[in-house]
Amino acid sequence: MAQKINTITKKIHFHAEDVDFQIKNKAIIRAWIGERILYANYEANEINYIFVSDEYLYKINLEQLQHNYYTDIITFHYHEPESKKILSDIYISIDRVKENAILHNISFETELYRVMIHGILHLLGYDDHEETDIQEMRKAEEEALQKLSI
C-alpha cells in the first residue's frame, strides 16, 4: 500500500496563480490525499491544486460554469465518469478559505484542508446538491480530517 500511495503522491501538484501562497507540509498532505484516493479504490493520473484569489475563481465560475457568485472551490475532472483514474484541476480561493475560517471560528489550515479534501471527494463520486448529499459530504470531510496528522 505504501508504494501505491507513493505513486499517487508524485501525481499531486500544488500551484499558485495570482496569490502569494505556498502550502505547508506538502509531503504529508500528498500522502493524506493519496490514502483517501486509495481507500475509495481510485488511482491518480494527475491532480493539480491551483490556489487563487477570489476574483480569479469568480471569473472561472462565471465564464466556465455561468455561476455569478464567489465560491471557495471549483473542481474540474477530465477523466471519464466511470474511470477510476483521476485527472483533475482543483481551484481554491485562498481569500474565501480565510474568510470561511474566520466565519466558522477555525484555523485557516483546517479550513484549507477541508476544502482540499472536498474537491477530492467530488472526484470520488460525492455530491453536495441535496441536503442528504451535503450531510454525507460533511461526514466524509470530517472523517478525512481526522486521518490527517500534522
Image (spheres, rainbow, N blue to C red):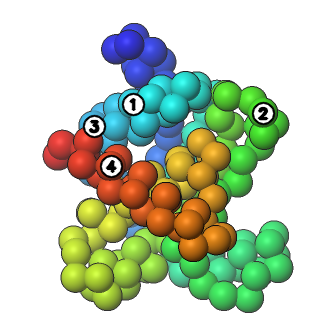
- The residue wearing badge 1 is 35
Q: Reading the chain from its start, which is encountered first: label 2 or label 1? A: 1
Q: Earlier in the sequence, mark 2 or mark 4?
A: 2
For residue 47, side relative to residue 64 (left or right): left
Q: Label 4 to label 3, Cα distance in Å? A: 17 Å
Q: Nearer the viewer, mark 2 or mark 3?
A: 2
The residue under the point 74% across, 88% down is 68
Q: Quadrant of the N terminus?
A: top left
Q: CA distance from mark 2 to mark 1?
A: 20 Å
Q: Amino acid at mark 4?
A: Glu
User: Looking at the picture, does residue 30 appear above or below residue 89?
Assistant: above
Q: Earlier in the sequence, mark 3 or mark 1?
A: 3
For marks 4 and 3, give the one nearer the viewer: 4
Q: Dot 4: what SS?
A: helix
First-in-chain label (4 vs 3): 3
Are the residues at dot 4 and dot 1 in contact (C-beta closer than 8 Å)? no
Residue at left offset 76%, top offset 82%: 67
Q: Residue 94, how many percent across, how many down?
A: 43, 72
| Amino acid type indicated by mark 1 | Glu
CA gap, disc 4 and disc 1:
12 Å
To which residue does mark 4 refer? 143
- 19 left or right, relative to 64: left
**Which label number is shown at residue 142?**
none
The residue wearing badge 3 is 28
Q: Foreground: 141 or 114?
A: 141
Q: Quadrant of residue 85?
A: top right
Element under label 1? helix
Crowd band around label 1 with a 10 angstrom C-alpha radius: few (<14), some (14–19), many (20+): many
